Image (cartoon, rainbow, N blue to C red):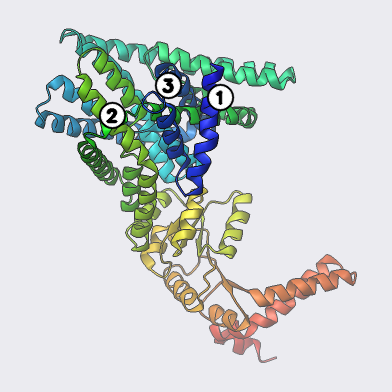
């Protein structure tokens, strides 16, 4: 055991940094390391099955950590995607791939196994990449996680069907009913135990002030829930996810997350290595052209179907395509289902090995698929095909919020201030890279041209409490202001300007208040000088406001000439 552990760590330390140095994702490095040290490479590790079982704990800990980042309220919001889009994805993709297997003269039993197994995607690969990029809390992260959770649930009937297919035909229905009953009972028991036991347990452990005991309690929770759901026929990772979800709303979440991070990282690396160990080049090389063609067909069909279903469920074009490409590969549960099918003689060994190679190759393509997905969404965003639809979907329930036109340094600062005070806001910006980076942080920023009335309408400016225009382009800022003021005569509109001249023009267009950067910087410096001279705060503010009124008076006079004439007779 020590020898194998040394080999695993040595392979990771040598191979992964090399592939990262040439710009290849670390997951590919782990796969290559597994291929090299596995039984089909240098045969330094002979026990593949035991290693893979241990490595599955990496996925378990990852799903536990993801559960910690969510909450029951957020999960309720995702329910439509989980039981709507997720269920549709598994059903439609499984039927399509199964129909393709039938056309290739495979029997009904084999078609059912192939369709069901290849409909699943890789939870470990996809969620690991989303976590590394900080995208789990974005809309893409929520959609992808929802589908993967339903796929985890689908493993339960999948295992029951594959087992029953090796028996009499009437056993399939009985197996499905039994699996559904066990799964329902296990989930109900786990949720009840989580609500009743977890918080008191951690309260007691925390009172001992023992970091080691706290870590042991976390390992106990993760492994016990994984074992319990596995015993009920569910996936281990689903049980761990629910355990994390139960702890997400407690005061112990951050410490638990910090404790499991090193364990999760090591075991996930081991999982990817164990997948690489399953690859048999002797099977792949002689028929590589067929395996490559099957892999490309799998990726194309799954990406197309998931993107199409995403559009039916209201996802914007860019997001639907991005989600489809992220989930186009085969998944780790396909290895389990295919291995079980070969063991029960439902699937011939040659066919099973071929399909295992297809799944492994498709999983290796995951980083490239994710890259293509991000660029496809960016391309669609830049052509205005995504922003308005996503913006309308996000802002559907918004009112009394603040609309920010432009999300540069000024817009970001304003958004931070609004967030600190608990005010809801939505921002639109034309910089695709900036929008993508902001959304990766979970911010409500959308691609869109605020000069278009359709975009400000989609942001529900008519229901907004205020609008802030922070655009760099003075002409564009005036267009936005003019359009808004035409339809929203009473809404406060605050505009950023570069200098005093821009301020005068914007006030004349109807801005409620304009803050020129040069003027405000000067006023702040003046405030500092008066403060250094010992002036009272109230007197300083009075002086600043007086100077500001003098600067804004000419523009206000032009905007309202009658009041100017009346006031000028004294």
Classify mark 1: helix, strand or loop: helix
Residue 39 as seen in the image, left or right of residue 285: right
Classify mark 2: helix, strand or loop: helix
State the separation of the CA atoms marked 2 and 1.
27 Å
As rendered, which of 433 and 46 lies closer to the eye? 46
User: 24 above or below 44?
Assistant: below
Name the residue beneath numbered marker 2.
282
As rendered, which of 277 and 495 lies closer to the eye? 277
Residue at figure coordinates x 51%, y 54% from the top left: 438
State the separation of the CA atoms marked 1 and 3.
16 Å
The answer to whether residue 453 shows anywhere in this view is yes
| Mark nearer the N terminus (3 vs 2) | 3
Residue at figure coordinates x 41%, y 14% from the top left: 230
Classify mark 3: helix, strand or loop: helix
As rendered, which of 281 and 337 lies closer to the eye? 281
Name the residue beneath numbered marker 1.
6
Q: Are marks 3 and 2 in contact (CB under 8 Å)?
A: no
Q: Position of residue 278 (x, y in %)?
A: 36, 26
Q: Position of residue 310 (x, y in %)?
A: 29, 43
Q: Position of residue 172 (x, y in %)?
A: 20, 12
Among the 4 quarters of the image, the one containing residue 31? top left
State the separation of the CA atoms marked 3 and 2.
21 Å
Among the 4 quarters of the image, the one containing residue 106? top left
Q: Position of residue 193 (x, y in %)?
A: 52, 14
Name the residue beneath numbered marker 3.
52
* Residue density around tag 1, few if under 14, some if 14–19, many if 20 or more, within 10 Å: few
User: 170 above or below 273?
Assistant: above
| Mark nearer the N terminus (1 vs 3) | 1
* Residue density around tag 3, few if under 14, some if 14–19, many if 20 or more, within 10 Å: some
């Amino acid at each position: 055991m020590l020898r194998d552990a040394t080999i695993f760590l040595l392979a990771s330390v040598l191979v992964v940094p090399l592939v990262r140095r040439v710009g290849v994702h670390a997951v590919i490095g782990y796969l290559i390391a597994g291929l090299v040290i596995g039984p089909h490479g240098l045969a330094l590790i002979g026990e593949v099955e035991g290693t893979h079982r241990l490595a599955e704990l990496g996925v378990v800990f990852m799903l536990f950590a993801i559960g910690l980042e969510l909450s029951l309220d957020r999960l309720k919001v995702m329910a439509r995607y989980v039981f709507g889009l997720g269920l549709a994805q598994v059903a439609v993709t499984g039927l399509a791939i199964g129909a393709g297997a039938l056309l290739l003269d495979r029997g009904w039993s084999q078609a059912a196994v192939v369709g069901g197994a290849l409909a699943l995607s890789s939870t470990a690969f996809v969620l690991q990449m989303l976590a590394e990029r900080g995208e789990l809390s974005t809309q893409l992260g929520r959609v992808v996680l929802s589908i993967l959770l339903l796929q985890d649930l689908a493993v339960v009937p999948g295992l029951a069907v594959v087992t029953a297919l090796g028996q009499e035909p009437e056993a399939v229905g009985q197996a499905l009913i039994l699996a559904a009953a066990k799964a329902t009972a296990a989930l109900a028991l786990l949720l009840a135990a989580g609500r009743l036991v977890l918080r008191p347990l951690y309260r007691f452990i925390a009172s001992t002030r023992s970091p080691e005991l706290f870590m042991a309690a976390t390992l106990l929770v993760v492994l016990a829930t994984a074992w319990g759901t596995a015993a009920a026929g569910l996936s281990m990772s689903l049980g761990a996810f629910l355990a994390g979800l139960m702890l997400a709303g407690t005061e112990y979440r951050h410490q638990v997350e910090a404790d499991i991070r090193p364990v999760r990282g090591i075991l996930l690396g081991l999982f990817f290595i164990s997948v690489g160990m399953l690859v048999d080049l002797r099977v792949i090389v002689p028929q590589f052209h067929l395996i490559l063609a099957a892999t490309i067909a799998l990726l194309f069909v799954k990406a197309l179907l998931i993107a199409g279903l995403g559009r039916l469920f209201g996802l914007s074009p860019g997001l639907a395509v991005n989600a489809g490409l992220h989930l186009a590969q085969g998944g780790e549960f396909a290895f389990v289902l295919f291995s079980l099918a070969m063991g029960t003689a439902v699937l011939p060994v040659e066919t099973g090995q071929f399909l295992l190679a297809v799944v492994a190759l498709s999983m290796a393509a995951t980083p490239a698929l994710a890259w293509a997905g991000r660029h496809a969404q960016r391309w669609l965003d830049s052509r205005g095909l995504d922003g308005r639809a996503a913006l309308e979907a996000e802002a559907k329930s918004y009112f009394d919020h603040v609309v920010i036109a432009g999300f540069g340094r000024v817009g970001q600062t304003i958004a931070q201030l609004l967030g600190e005070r608990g005010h809801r806001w939505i921002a639109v910006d034309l910089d695709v890279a900036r929008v993508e980076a902001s959304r990766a942080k979970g911010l409500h920023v959308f691609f869109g041209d605020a000069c278009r009335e359709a975009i400000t309408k989609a942001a529900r400016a008519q229901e907004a409490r205020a609008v802030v225009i922070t655009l760099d382009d003075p002409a564009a800022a005036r267009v936005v202001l003019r359009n808004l003021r035409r339809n929203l005569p009473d809404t406060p509109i605050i505009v950023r300007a570069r200098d005093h001249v821009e301020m005068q023009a914007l006030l004349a267009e109807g801005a409620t208040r304009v803050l020129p950067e040069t003027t405000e910087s000067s006023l702040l410096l003046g405030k500092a000088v008066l403060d250094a001279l010992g002036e009272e705060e109230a007197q300083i503010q009075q002086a600043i406001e007086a100077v500001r009124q003098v600067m804004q008076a000419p523009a206000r006079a032009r905007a309202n000439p009658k009041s100017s004439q009346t006031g000028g007779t004294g």
